[in-house]
Amino acid sequence: MKSLLVIQGHPDPIGNHFCHALAESFTKGAKTAGHQVKSIDIAKLDFALLHSQDEFENTVPPQDILEAQKLIKEAEHIALFFPLWLGTMPAIVKGFFEQTFRPGFAMDMSKPKKMPKRLLLGKSAHLFVTMGMPAIMYKRYFGAHGMKNLELNILKFAGVKPVEFSYIGMVQKEDSKKHIKWLKKAESYGQAGG
């Protein structure tokens, strides 16, 4: 049994998007297999964007972020769901990581002449990214640069690895067979514990 954290990164707090259906399928599969599952819905958290390095390094995070940090610390595996916006994660997801992955939580920066110590070692992640374009186009033509930043400069920099991606393209097309296929895949990832 693993401790899993499902992070919903769709900016619309109302729900009813394919990202929400994918997260529900993942959760269903995980619970069926006996894994412990907790969740965060970023759009429902109360936090502001950071405006300075001083804020990032020296202020106490808002209560919702402190609770999110606790859940991230407890998790062995993180499943993150969000739509691709302008080639990368939505601003609210980036703002969440800026608030959450602060010094002292994600990395120890107390020795300025040395590389920061990674504080989230032993955790893995799987990111489910939905998009309107074909997934192959995003990966091959655009090089998935927005996801490389999230993988290397945020998650792996803090020690989270491996980081896997599922790119789900053309989600706005009415293709129930494709949607059902992806929902079943998400459920199987949940059953496997990530």
Image (cartoon, helix red, strand yellow):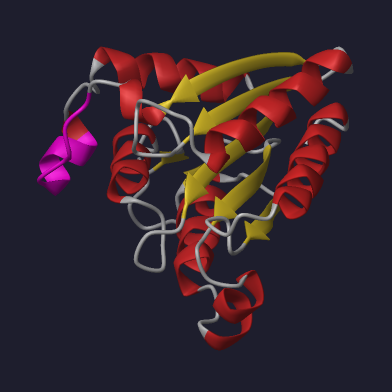
Q: Nearer the viewer, residue 31 or 161?
A: 31
Q: Picture quarter containing residue 138? A: bottom right
- Quick check: 68 left or right of 141? left
Q: Picture quarter containing residue 33? A: top right
- Quick check: 125 left or right of 155? right
Residue 103 percent location from the top left of the image: 35, 37
Figure quadrant of the N terminus: top right
The residue located at (32%, 16%) in the rendering is 64
The residue located at (36%, 33%) in the rendering is 100
Magenta stretch?
Answer: 47-57
Query: Is residue 119 visible in the rendered structure shown here?
Result: no
Residue 153 percent location from the top left of the image: 46, 59
Residue 97 percent location from the top left of the image: 37, 41
Please check the rendered image and state whether residue 28 is part of the magenta-colored stretch, yes or no: no
The residue located at (54%, 73%) in the rendering is 144
Figure quadrant of the C terminus: top right
Residue 105 percent location from the top left of the image: 42, 30
Q: How many marks?
A: 0
Of all residues shown, which one is farthest toward the bottom?
A: 141
Please check the rendered image and state whether residue 56 is part of the magenta-colored stretch, yes or no: yes
- Quick check: 180 left or right of 127? right
Q: Nearer the viewer, residue 147 or 19?
A: 19
Q: Is residue 87 above or below residue 37?
A: below
Query: Is residue 31 visible in the rendered structure shown here?
Result: yes
- Quick check: 120 left or right of 76? left
Q: Picture quarter containing residue 125? A: top right
The residue located at (68%, 16%) in the rendering is 37
